[in-house]
Amino acid sequence: MQFFQGHSHCTKFGNQTSAFREITASIVQGSAIGPASYVVTSCDLTAVTAGNRVCKYADDTYIIIPACNSHSRLAELDHIGTWAGHNNLHLNRVKSVELNVSAPRRRRQFNPPACRPEIKRVTTLTILGVTITNKLSVSEHVRTVVNSCTQIMHAIRILRSRGMGDAQLQLVYLAVVVAKLTYASSSWWGFTTASDRQHLEGFLRRGCRQNLYSTDIYNSNSRRN
């Protein structure tokens, strides 16, 4: 643990550099070592109720609680707040939200009592760049990603008008557009509807027609999915 001790920080602006000040927090915000530091710090952060799970990635923490354990929500939240205080961290409850997930075809909606006044209950949540709803739908995520890629296509058309060749444009399309469309797709593809898949595949077909995406690659991806 000595590697995480004795850190200092300074700020440089223009030709001036401030004096060094000791860092008293255990996680250096925005640093390359920050995510690894949090992994080490949070290794002892676990759920206090059997059946609940705590999922951690970088500085994002999610508590997964089944309906049968809904009574444990306050205890889990208080436990994380206490753990954060012991590790020189702060649980920002205002930025914390609650998402109640139920089966898409379930008629009866399960609505547990409010967790805390400062904890907002939401119907959509973006987890590591993937937006899901309380009905386990990713349609909003698909729309957001396709709209973002549509804006990127405008930049690609400008590059083509400036003389960039098809081979280079195809590399840009693969590296930016296809990468964005398929980001973490293994985690959300199973929740897509036929309409979602048509939306994504229609966008890729337009790329094929504009000679930006190989039809062989498109057909291969279609068969795989």
Image (cartoon, rainbow, N blue to C red):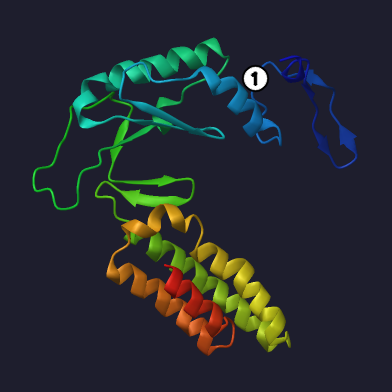
Does 116 sit above or below residue 162? above
Residue 33 location (% of width, % of height): 70, 32
Q: Give the crowd class for mark 1: few <14, some 14-19, many >=20 residues within 10 Å.
A: some
In which quadrant of the rendered view does residue 192 lie? Answer: bottom left
Residue 78 location (% of width, % of height): 37, 15
Residue at image position (15%, 37%) is 110
Residue 84 location (% of width, % of height): 50, 17
Residue at image position (67%, 88%) is 161
Q: Is residue 1 left or right of residue 10?
A: left
Pick the residue in front: 81 or 54: 54
Q: Is residue 6 left or right of residue 48?
A: right
Residue at image position (41%, 76%) is 201
Q: Is residue 214 left or right of residue 21?
A: left
Pick the residue in front: 59 or 40: 40
| Quadrant where the image shows the N terminus | top right
Per the image, label 1 sits on a secondary structure element best described as loop
In which quadrant of the rendered view does residue 46 lie? Answer: top left
Does 187 sit above or below residue 96? below
| Quadrant where the image shows the C terminus | bottom left
Does 148 sit above or below residue 158? above
| Residue type, label 1 | Ser
Pick the residue in front: 87 or 190: 190
Residue on which the image places disc 1: 26
